[in-house]
Amino acid sequence: MSAVRAAVLTRCGDPGPFAQTRPIEVRELGLGDPGPGEVRVRIRAAGLCHSDLSVIDGNRPRPVPMVLGHEAAGEVVATGPDCTLAPGDRVVLAFVPACGECEPCLSGRAALCEPGAAANTDGTLLVGERRWRGDGEELIHHHLGVSAFAEEVIVSERSAVPIPDDLPYETAAVFGCAVLTGVGAAMNAADIEPGSTVAVVGLGGVGISAVMGARLAGAGKVIAVDPVAFKREKALELGASEAIDPGDDLAAQLRAAPGGPPASVIETVGSATVLRAAYEATARGGTTVTVGLPAPDAMLSIPAVSLVTEERTLRGSYHGSGAPREILPRLFDEWRAGNLPADQLITDRLTLDELNEGFDRLASGEQLRQVAVP
Ligand SMILES: [Zn+2]
Ligand SMILES: [Zn+2]
């Protein structure tokens, strides 16, 4: 057992501004030893993601107190028994541990790992235990098997994917969620035909990654959509052919696009209203993909017959729609070839003590990816 500094979310549903209400407290916690198949990782960079914000503001409640954060890269400093990783290995952390034995894992869909999802819901590691120690008997939960906002963490090695020596930790961190989610949705879920038109709705870290992914998948034209001007500029720099403000009728604007409605639309906002508009905007016969995370009770209403008579596909994509262990090495190669400049997503850096302020900035839309360096 040793002491590490970690950012603990003390309650869900805080109204903010978090700079005043301070739902995240940096505490000194005990961290036990890694168990079988577990590694201890010194976190070198951890990204602030919208789905952390959804836990803080109560849109996606999780058990608290919890060490927040799920997008990180770092260095293995210790290993438990039966590990293939070794101290000194550089890794990015994946936010669904892949048990390797359940049906989804065996069929190449590790993002849907069943024991992984159960552990994430409970706030434990894959083995069903917690390695954090707070005061007395208080249980401190893990966030998605990662708990990125800490100096050091213990994770299942099935949450860790090795990274190349030449990939900086900060860039590697954003591969763990934003890039994997956005590029994976474009490449593995959106049915993008070479030369086709693709729209990406919502231009946070995931959305901009989806723009880059649409290019990698061979899209002829990529229309980027967001009300925030600097995000539209960024999308244009990173591969969008045009960038539009959705105004008050997203579907009408996209359907009126020169060349006709997009064949694939990727929605990253996490709003059922926006998803419905994205569905309406998609061309007949096309595919609408959602990677946003609406509140658990949000319902979607679409004209049911349109699925049949217009041969539409509506699908979700989680964690890149595949196995991070297989997808990420291919994406690292694209990064090295200059086709996936993920470092361009990073717009600010901060410390663990500044996370409340950082999430205010994320909520206001003024940042893409901020990276905490513990
Ligand atoms: Zn995320
Ligand atoms: Zn599994």
Image (cartoon, grey):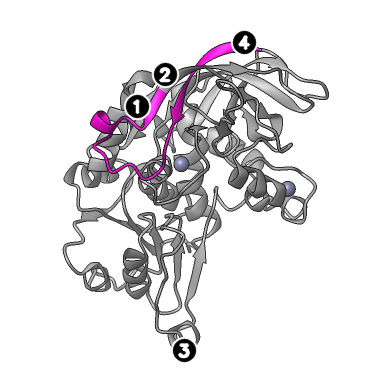
| Residue named by callout 3 | 309
Element under disc 2: loop
In front: label 2 or label 1: 1
Which mark is first along the chain, 2 or 3?
A: 3
Which residue occupies 38% across, 29% down? 24
- Occupied quadrant, residue 119: top right
Q: x, y (%) of residue 104?
A: 72, 55
In front: label 3 or label 2: 2
Amino acid type for the residue under numbered disc 1: Leu
Q: CA distance from mark 4 to mark 1?
A: 23 Å
In front: label 4 or label 2: 4
Which mark is first along the chain, 3 or 4?
A: 4
Instruction: State the quadrant of the C terminus.
Output: top left
* Magenta part of the chain: 1-25
| Residue named by callout 2 | 373
Q: CA distance from mark 3 to mark 2?
A: 51 Å
| Residue 315 seen from this side | yes
| Residue named by callout 4 | 2
| Residue named by callout 1 | 355
Q: x, y (%) of residue 301?
A: 39, 77
